[in-house]
Image (tube, rainbow, N blue to C red):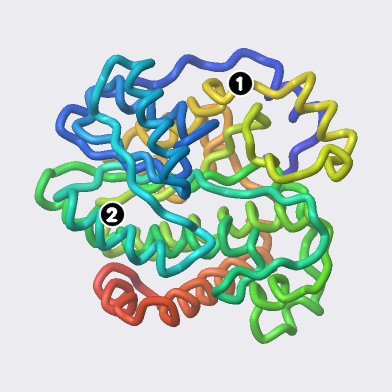
């Protein structure tokens, strides 16, 4: 399925949703980034009830994060959830988070990169790191985290004889990004060219950010496959769910069609979180059935026609290399990780 028709989208939203996949996680460590509300919160609760030794709920706000941990413990009756702070709009916060995590745990079995934003403003707002905020939070920072935590996950695999997974939350909205014209490919830096636009269509920007998530996932999986097939990386679409993703948007800024869909066909955050859990736990790990996969409705589906096209392959390669270049600027030791764990950099 290379394109997503609106009838198929409606069918996916309104048809039966499978129950949550369950697995014994005794002794294992799970990190859910963006876990104080919505999909991440519900996914963290699911992992907690499967016996994980530690479910780390990584949040931006200490106050909201602490409240989420307390609420999760009350709702599950378990004390295996804990808070760590990370702000994806701040690269230094990410480095601090990784350093603290490595000091706190000796294994990482599942990394769910769920945090994201969907601003409805059309004017560019830059982070202190110089990137447009949605591009940094949705694309650069999750990718940076995945790379920085790769050594811990590989070590977990070797020492514990398990197959850890990194799950990057994307969206079916990536289907609606039109194929890039040749003018885009003439830009020396694809991501920077898009990030630096002074004005943009906010919905188009969100869709693009989700496309880049798919690109990064596929590219990283391909480079891992030949060297360290002991870590699985995939992306997942949770569907349209009732979350706080657009919490910063004024009602007047939200497209009417989106408001109507949220009111009529959106699934609950708990139902959407089942997709995240499936991507993390389901499938034949030994066969690598979910390696680099795009997961939707608890099955592997083909991403957009553009993703699998020749131009899409070029854009995917450029996206990955530009993310790696950005990571090098943020953290010089990333080169050691790239050389040891990846091919073709």
Q: Is residue 129 left or right of residue 292?
A: right
Element marked by disc 2: loop
**Dot 2, crowdedness within 10 Å: few (<14), some or many (≥20)?**
many
State the residue position of label 1.
268
- x and y percentages locating residue 300 in the rendered image: 52, 36
Element marked by disc 1: loop
Lower position in the chain sequence, tag 2 or tag 1? 2
Q: Residue at x 71, y 66 (%)?
A: 125
Report which quarter residue 9 is drawn in. top right
- x and y percentages locating residue 218 in the rendered image: 50, 57
Q: Residue at x 80, y 27 (%)?
A: 261
State the residue position of label 2.
229
From the viewer's side, name the closer residue of 221 and 166: 166
- x and y percentages locating residue 84 in the rendered image: 33, 47
Report which quarter residue 151 is drawn in. bottom left
Q: Residue at x 42, y 31 (%)?
A: 67
Q: Is residue 232 left or right of residue 286?
A: right
Q: Can the viewer see residue 293?
A: no
Q: Which quadrant is the N terminus positioned in?
A: top right
Q: Is residue 251 above or below residue 130?
A: above
Q: Is residue 340 above or below residue 83?
A: below
């Amino acid at each position: 399925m290379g394109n997503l028709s609106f009838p198929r989208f409606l069918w996916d939203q309104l048809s039966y949703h499978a129950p949550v996949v369950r697995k014994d996680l005794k002794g294992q460590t799970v990190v859910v980034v963006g876990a104080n509300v919505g999909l991440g919160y519900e996914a963290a609760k699911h992992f907690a009830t499967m016996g994980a030794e530690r479910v780390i709920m990584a949040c931006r706000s200490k106050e909201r994060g602490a409240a989420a941990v307390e609420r999760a413990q009350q709702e599950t009756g378990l004390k295996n959830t804990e808070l760590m702070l990370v702000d994806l709009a701040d690269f230094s916060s990410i480095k601090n988070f990784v350093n603290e995590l490595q000091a706190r745990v000796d294994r990482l079995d599942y990394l769910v990169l769920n945090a994201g934003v969907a601003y409805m403003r059309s004017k560019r707002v830059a982070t202190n790191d110089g990137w447009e905020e949605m591009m940094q939070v949705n694309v650069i920072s999750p990718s940076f985290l995945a790379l920085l935590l790769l050594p811990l996950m590989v070590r977990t695999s070797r020492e514990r004889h398990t197959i850890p997974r990194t799950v990057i939350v994307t969206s079916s909205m990536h289907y609606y990004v039109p194929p890039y014209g040749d003018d885009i490919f003439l830009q020396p830096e694809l991501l920077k060219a898009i990030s630096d636009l002074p004005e943009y269509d906010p919905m188009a920007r969100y869709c693009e950010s989700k496309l880049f998530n798919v690109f990064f996932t596929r590219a990283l999986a391909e480079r891992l496959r030949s060297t360290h097939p002991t870590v699985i990386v995939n992306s997942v679409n949770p569907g349209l769910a009732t979350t706080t993703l657009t919490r910063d948007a004024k009602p007047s800024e939200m497209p009417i069609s989106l408001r109507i869909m949220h009111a009529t066909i959106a699934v609950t955050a708990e139902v959407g979180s089942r997709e995240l859990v499936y991507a993390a736990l389901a499938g034949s790990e030994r066969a690598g059935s979910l390696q680099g996969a795009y997961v939707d409705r608890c099955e592997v589906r083909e991403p957009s026609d553009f993703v699998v096209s020749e131009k899409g392959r070029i854009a995917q390669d450029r996206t990955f290399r530009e993310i790696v270049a950005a990571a090098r600027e943020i953290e010089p030791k990333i080169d050691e990780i790239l050389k040891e764990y990846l091919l073709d950099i």
